[in-house]
Image (cartoon, rainbow, N blue to C red):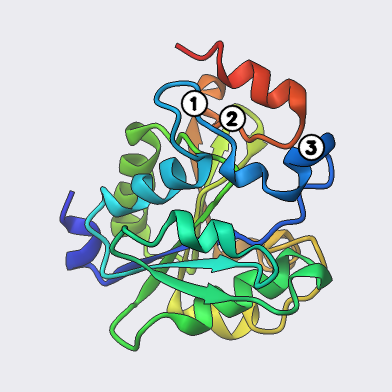
């Protein structure tokens, strides 16, 4: 799907969360949990999902105190960006990731490291809507539930740079509803995230 790169779209993978809801030792490195399909770390699946789109570039925002996450991604053609302020909330990682993109990037596709499987149909629908409407924000809505990934044009970058806390871009989306192109998708396409042991167990049951 070279159209992503042809349109100047880069990727930002947020992989600097604390994983507090994942019990036990996995809370220290939930992104390194083995995907049931092939045993590779979850974060590799998330990164490969972006790389497969032919983006201009992909940056991954990580915590400096968890070098194993960066090490797991070392062989992939992407750029690792540390966020020393990760504990201050997801907004800090979003700011760091967007700021790290090169000047040739006209829009950022933002995905989550703990959401390892996004259906190709979701990416395709986002790109189609972005090309058709070119709003500052393109957001999928699964049934009635908004979810990741989300596309931001460079026009939204200054507002993203002013975000704070753990609410990520939701604050901006609420504040600027006219900026948002909402892409209606079936609820069944909502990408499963892995926040808890129950989520991880459910991943093994995915077809």
Q: Which residue is mark 2?
A: 192
Q: Secondary structure at mark 3?
A: loop
The one nearer the camera, 166 or 80, is 80
Tell me where residue 102 appears, x and y as whole percent: 35, 84
Q: Secondary structure at mark 1?
A: helix
The reply, left or right, for residue 43 in relation to residue 17 is left
Disc ID at residue 95: none
The one nearer the camera, 40 or 125, is 40
Tell me where residue 58 appears, x and y as whole percent: 37, 66
The reply, left or right, for residue 87 in relation to residue 156 is right
Q: Secondary structure at mark 2?
A: loop
Examine the rendered structure and indicate whether residue 24 appears above or below residue 134: above
> Looking at the image, is mark 1 or mark 3 nearer the viewer?
3
Bin the neighbour count of mark 3 within 10 Å (Cα to Cα): few under 14, some 14-19, many 20 and up. some
> Can I make out residue 156 in this image?
no
For residue 92, what is the image quadrant?
A: bottom right
Q: Residue at x 45, y 29 (%)?
A: 39
Q: Residue at x 42, y 21 (%)?
A: 37
Counting residues from the N terminus, which is met first, the one under dot 3 or under dot 2? 3
Q: Which residue is mark 3?
A: 22
Q: Which residue is mark 1?
A: 189
Q: Residue at x 83, y 36 (%)?
A: 24
Q: Whole-Å distance between the Cαs marked 3 and 2? A: 15 Å
> Looking at the image, is mark 3 or mark 2 nearer the viewer?
3
């Amino acid at each position: 799907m070279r159209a992503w790169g042809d349109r100047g779209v880069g990727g930002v993978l947020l992989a600097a969360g604390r994983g507090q809801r994942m019990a036990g030792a996995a809370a220290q490195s939930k992104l390194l949990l083995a995907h049931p399909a092939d045993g590779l770390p979850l974060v590799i699946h998330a990164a490969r999902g972006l790389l497969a789109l032919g983006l201009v570039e992909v940056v991954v925002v990580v915590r400096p105190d968890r070098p194993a996450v960066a090490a797991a991604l070392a062989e992939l053609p992407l750029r690792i960006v540390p966020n020393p302020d990760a504990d201050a909330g997801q907004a800090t990682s979003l700011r760091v990731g967007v700021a790290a993109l090169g000047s040739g990037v006209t829009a950022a596709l933002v995905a989550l490291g703990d959401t390892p499987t996004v259906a190709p149909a979701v990416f395709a629908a986002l790109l189609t809507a972005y090309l058709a409407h070119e709003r500052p924000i393109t957001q999928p809505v699964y049934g009635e539930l908004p979810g990741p990934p989300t596309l931001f044009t460079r026009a939204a970058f200054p507002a993203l740079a002013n975000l704070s806390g753990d609410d990520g871009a939701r604050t901006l989306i609420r504040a600027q509803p006219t900026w948002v192109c909402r892409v209606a998708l079936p609820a069944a396409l909502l990408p499963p995230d892995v926040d808890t042991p129950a989520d991880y167990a459910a991943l093994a049951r995915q077809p």
